[in-house]
């Protein structure tokens, strides 16, 4: 597993994308998969920024997995609880909210939310069958 | 890196990475489009929901003004994002 901390603001999106790309490359996975993982990371991270009240100066992003899967873990420290996995998705025509979580639920294979010691922890698994 | 180039005749070229950090810049540029528009996405490498939202807002603004809005030349992975978001039922994807 690799893990890195990033400042808790939108300027971290490109460094996060590079981190994902490096990881996918190190695993020998198809480079196209970094696009998908990058998208999942952005949607979860921006959701944290939008809904996670409070929050420390950094979040952590962990990447792990075996064979054709990637497991990503995002941790938001010292934050109020917000569970993006609960509740129904609102109908969306793309102009309102909810589009990002719609994408996450459509693309991911599993997603889990935990709230431990004032940290929000999202663990998502994406499989890339050969 | 993200770039947007608005040419005469309503041709708009998007390139690079349209993520949440670039959404405001994309919106500001697209808000200047006042005619039917064709967005050339041949060089767009990445789009997230933030970018999709801006494109849908632009589509609705132009549609409500009686103008057209087309998306062309998108890479398969970009098209997949539109489809997963259900926007293939909202937008014209050429």
Image (tube, coloured by chain):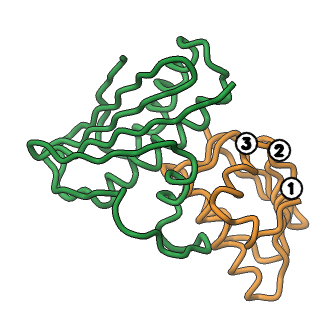
Chain colours: A green, B orange
Both marks 2 and 1 on one chain: yes
Mark 3: give few (<14), some (14-19) or many (20+) Cα within 10 Å: some
Q: CA distance from mark 2 to mark 1?
A: 7 Å
Q: Residue A9 placed where, x, y %?
A: 34, 45
Quadrant hosting residue A78: top left
> Which of the two residues, A16 or B21, is positioned nearer the viewer here?
A16
Q: Quadrant of the N terminus of chain A?
A: top left
Q: Residue furthest left?
A: A117
Q: Is residue A6 left or right of residue A19?
A: left
The mark lying in front, picked from 1 and 3, is: 3
Horizontal and vertical percent position of residue B16: 67, 40
Measured along the vertical axis of the image, is residue A102 above or below residue A76? below
Residue B71 spot, x, y in % from top left = 82, 60
Q: Are marks 2 and 3 in contact (CB under 8 Å)?
A: no
Name the residue that disc number 3 marks: B77
Query: What residue would you read off at disc 2?
Result: B42
Q: Which mark is on residue B72?
A: 1
Q: What's the chain of the residue with tag 3?
A: B
- Residue at x-position 41% and y-position 41%: A11
Comes first in the chain, label 2 or label 3: 2
Query: Relative to residue B94, is residue A57 drawn left or right?
Result: left
Secondary structure found at label 2: strand
Write the residue at 79% across / 49% down: B41
Q: Tell me if residue A71 comes above or below residue B39 in the rendering.
A: above
- Residue B72 figure quarter: bottom right
Quick check: A127 left or right of A124?
Answer: right
Which callout, 2 or 1, points at the residue further toward the start of the chain? 2
């Amino acid at each position: 597993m690799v893990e890195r901390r990033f400042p808790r603001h939108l300027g971290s999106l490109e460094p996060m994308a590079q981190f994902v790309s490096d990881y996918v490359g190190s695993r020998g996975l198809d480079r196209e998969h970094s696009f998908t993982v990058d998208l999942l990371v952005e949607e979860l991270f921006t959701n944290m920024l939008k809904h996670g009240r409070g929050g420390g100066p950094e979040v952590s992003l962990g990447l792990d997995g075996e064979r054709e899967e990637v497991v990503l873990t995002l941790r938001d420290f010292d934050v109020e609880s917000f569970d993006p996995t609960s509740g129904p998705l609102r109908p969306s025509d793309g102009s309102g909210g909810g589009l990002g979580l719609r994408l996450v639920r459509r693309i991911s294979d599993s997603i889990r939310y935990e709230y431990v010691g004032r940290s929000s922890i999202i663990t998502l698994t994406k499989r890339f069958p050969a | 890196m993200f770039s947007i180039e608005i040419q005469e005749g309503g041709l708009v070229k998007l390139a690079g990475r349209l993520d949440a950090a670039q959404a405001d810049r994309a919106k500001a540029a697209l808000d200047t489009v006042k005619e039917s528009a064709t967005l050339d996405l041949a060089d767009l490498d990445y789009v997230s929901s933030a970018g999709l939202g801006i494109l849908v807002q632009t589509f609705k603004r132009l549609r409500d003004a009686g103008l057209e809005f087309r998306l062309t030349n998108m890479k398969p992975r970009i098209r997949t994002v539109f489809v997963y978001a259900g926007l293939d039922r909202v937008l014209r994807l050429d």
